[in-house]
Image (cartoon, rainbow, N blue to C red):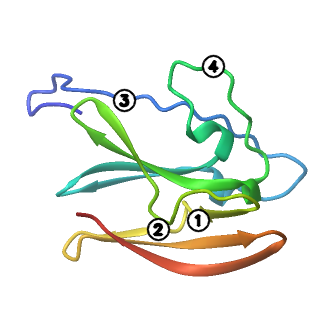
Amino acid sequence: MFSDTGAEISGYAIKKLQQETHGVDNAQFMSYDYISTSKGNYILFNDAVSNIGKGEDESKRRKVSAVSLTNSVGYRLNNNNLERVFFFGEPTDNSSIFSYTSGTDYNESANTYATVIIERNGRKKEARLAWVTFD
């Protein structure tokens, strides 16, 4: 974040380790989205459940190579702090919800973010449209 004069106000770094393998095109799910709203700024990406609860000082993170085993996680950037939020629900055993980070839209006038999510329950996957309104 920069001031009107270009001086740094604050900055954030979020560790994530992702690798595309096996010729499977997961790239559209491996990116991230930055959403700037009147209520705050957010980062959204898909990550392995084992990585989600780790502190930023912990170095051992699981490499994400299969998007089906990830969950969408968001971080609200708030006064030099990261506040974790799950826009589409918290991770559960044998299921996940991950988002299509390359195909999103934020409508500023409606304060609404739209994307495609994939809900996985066991081996069954269903695509859905999801809308998030920021408080």
Q: Position of residue 109 (x, y in %)?
A: 19, 74
Circle 3 crowding by C-alpha within 10 Å: few under 14, some 14–19, many from 20 = few
Pair 4/2: label in front = 4
Q: Are marks 1 and 3 in contact (CB under 8 Å)?
A: no
Distance CA(mark 4)–CA(mark 1): 27 Å
Q: Residue at x 55, y 62 (%)?
A: 102
Q: Position of residue 96 (x, y in %)?
A: 67, 62
Which image quarter: residue 111? bottom left
Q: Position of residue 122 (x, y in %)?
A: 81, 69
- Name the kind of residue labelled 3 in the image: Tyr
Looking at the image, residue 124 sits to the left or right of residue 57; the answer is right
Pair 3/2: label in front = 3
Determine the secondary structure under disc 1. loop
Residue at image mark 2 = 104
- Up the image or down, 115 lies above or below 77; here it is below
Looking at the image, residue 57 sits to the left or right of residue 70; the answer is left
Pair 3/4: label in front = 4
Residue at image mark 3 = 12
Q: Are marks 4 and 2 in contact (CB under 8 Å)?
A: no
- Name the kind of residue labelled 4 in the image: Ser
Distance CA(mark 2)–CA(mark 1): 7 Å
Pair 4/1: label in front = 4
Q: Tell me which label, 1 or 3, sits earlier in the chain.
A: 3
Q: Residue 100's mark?
A: 1
Determine the secondary structure under disc 2. loop
Q: Residue 17's mark?
A: none
- Name the kind of residue labelled 1 in the image: Tyr
Q: Residue at x 74, y 54 (%)?
A: 69
